[in-house]
Image (cartoon, rainbow, N blue to C red):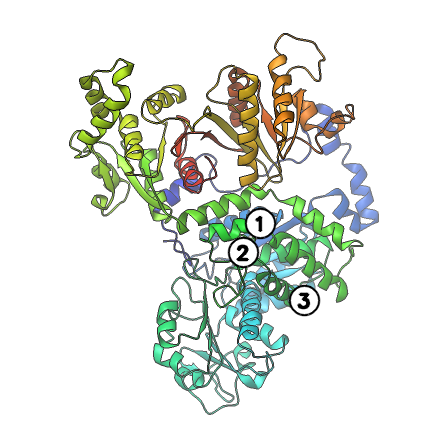
Amino acid sequence: MSEGSNVQFSEREALLFHSQGRPGKIEIIASKPMATQRDLSLAYSPGVAVPVREIARDPEKAYDYTAKGNLVAVISNGTAILGLGNLGALASKPVMEGKAVLFKRFADVDSIDIELNTEDVDRFIDAVELMEPSFGGINLEDIAAPSCFVIEQTLRERMNIPVFHDDQHGTAIITAAGLINAVHLTGRTLSEVKVVVNGAGAAAIACTELIKAMGVRSDNVIMCDRKGVIYQGRDDVNQWQSAHAADTDRRTLTEALSGADIFLGLSAAGALKPEMVADMAPRPIIFAMANPDPEITPPEARAARPDAIIATGRSDYPNQVYNVLGFPFIFRGALDVRATTINDEMKIAAAQALAKLARQQVPEEVAAAYGGRLHSFGADYIIPAPFDPRLMEVVPAAVAQAAMDSGVARRPIPDMAAYRDQLKARLNPTTSVLTLAYEGARQHPKRVVFAEAEEEVVLRAAIAFRDGGYGTPVLVGRDEVPDKLRALGVDDPDSFELHNSRISPLVPRMVDHLYARLQRRGYLRRDVELLVNQDRNIFGALLLALGEADVMITGVTRTYAQTLQQIRRVLDPVENHKPFGIHVLVGQSHTVFMADTTVNERPSAAELADIAEHTAAVARRMGHEPRVAFLSYSTFGNPAGHWLDNIRDAVTILDQRGVGFEYEGEMAPDVALNPALAKNYPFMRLSGPANVLVMPGLQSANLSAKLLRELGGDAVIGPMLVGMEHPVQIATMGATASELVTLAVLAAAGIAR
């Protein structure tokens, strides 16, 4: 089980994820062309000498001519690896790579992991200090206390770039945001609340320092460790803990909590007992953040005090204290103003921005993903959802403004409104929608048929789908499937629902249903019986037709065309609609939808218009305002050709329908995608590069999609089958388990329909 989450997976699946293809999770990609000798000469010698001289004259030019300004080092010595303890620098590398991925995914910050093989504080400090010319910021991670305090403080004093220990301050900032709102909801003020902090490690001390900086009175805070209250005069605590020693005669956690308003737990599972909660002040505020299991579960706390406001580190309970709400966006804002440090003012600004965001109306797509539960600010929503797309705009802007106001910004931003627009443009909304689709699948789990369950990749996908909490996998396969599940590390293979057509009690109903459908298409009853008994796709599709399942995934053992032909024997398209396929190309800051890439060989004008409309609808469901280009070898009649009429007629049909999105054609792909070329056609109706490409025929579409999958730099989702009466997705024969799960989730969430 992953730490601090309810998402589960087998050890084999985790190892395969990290090892398949290129080992690890990150790679370095050149941001400039490197194809010709001239490119190389500009990138290295002799061209590189020009920026070298400029930087030597003015060190600030490094931000203009190198990646320094958007580059953060994630550094650890592996002495406190996320709940696993001191396993060493090398063992921390997968975690640090993961942190680098989160920086890029959430805030478009480039990041590289660095593991230092030393527990000597001075050597660690010296090593990091010497790296200052290379990076715009330093993110310290998984370093044990009390060394982490010395390391961070010394580096902040010696270095002129932001140094941030996320284990301390990330948790503190998100906690502070939640506390601002919890205090507001309960009619309190920070200056009057009585707080008990249980835990005296790095995160607990950082939380305590931040809430005191925000107005909580020192004499209203009691910190406890496993031995009890840290009180003035206690001689077995370190200097950082003793700084928060309370002047009190209370000695136990139970005594400390009597009448307290707030419990901040950064300790151990079960540390907070229901009777302690019952003895707290009216409307108690409980942040039980022990990892992976909280000090008390929300049901236990609410049973003791129904009026409590409760937060944990878990995603399966409301109010998740999740560091990814903070560190990517804090560094984004700090880097953009070239801040020399991340100070208390910037941390408080981040907390206040998060608190304010939680009080705003939740976007429809976020609320839908969480089962419609997040429509308004309240006791179960005091912290923004981790995947709210507005985080990228709100938090960096607040941090940047605080850096400017506190005098640590070396490059102030002159136009904050324009900066917020730039922030929104940095990230691809598809990534947020995909994440929300996964969350939506958890909130509305479906029964998904995995029709080729003898295949290892399908079983791994089914295991991941179930363990991720996305729904119930319905396996279609033979007797050997349980043994294969066991070989993949499943301890209880019989807990999986398995349908074997040779012995299934559903077969008579299936035969009756399919024979009634096919008897006037040349099929005898015995033919239908053979189909049901021998063909997994027929059997799986019949599970949908009879209401025994909600979604179907197949395709890894046969070609797309063969698989679709089998499914069409059982299931129909949506009325008055032809099914078609969409490939989705996802980059860091863009998404392109390409259709029809799988089904219709030579679409008519009306069919092209339908494909455009339905693909535009998919684009909108994935967070994009569609701009449709009907592609051709010809751009507005140049060169002339014999195959242009249906494309032009499709545009005319959309004119007549009065659709609510931009569209244009016919045009070549470079004109559709390159704004510089598009300027040659001032009459063009697209306001920007096209993001929906309607292909003229299956040959060009399928070739393009497969070439881009193999040669392009974008991630590719799909093909997604659109237009069937039941949610069916047909994967490619080379699909990975992760791709199968994504298709299943998109179908279950209603995005691919």
Question: Marks 2 and 1: in contact by CB < 8 Å?
Answer: yes
Residue at horizontal 20 percent and vertical 20 percent from the top: 530
Assess whether mark 1 and mark 3 are in contact (beta carbons under 8 angstroms): no
- Residue at numbered disc 2: 324
Residue 254: horizontal and vertical position, in percent? 39, 83
Tag 1 secondary structure:
helix
Residue pointed to by mark 1: 106
Query: What is the three-letter code of the residue carrying label 3?
Result: Asn
Cα distance, mark 3 to mark 2?
19 Å
* Residue at the limit of the structure toward the top, as seen here: 642
State the image coordinates of residue 81 (x, y, percent, origin top left).
45, 58
Q: Which residue is mark 3?
A: 343
Q: From the viewer's perspective, is residue 612 above or below residue 179?
A: above
Q: Nearer the viewer, residue 478 or 609?
A: 609
Marks 3/2 in contact by CB < 8 Å: the verdict is no
Identified at 58% across, 63% down, the residue is 359
Tell me the kind of residue under disc 2.
Val
- SS under mark 3: loop
Q: Quick check: 199 above or below 723?
A: below
Q: Which residue sits at x=44%, y=39%?
A: 742
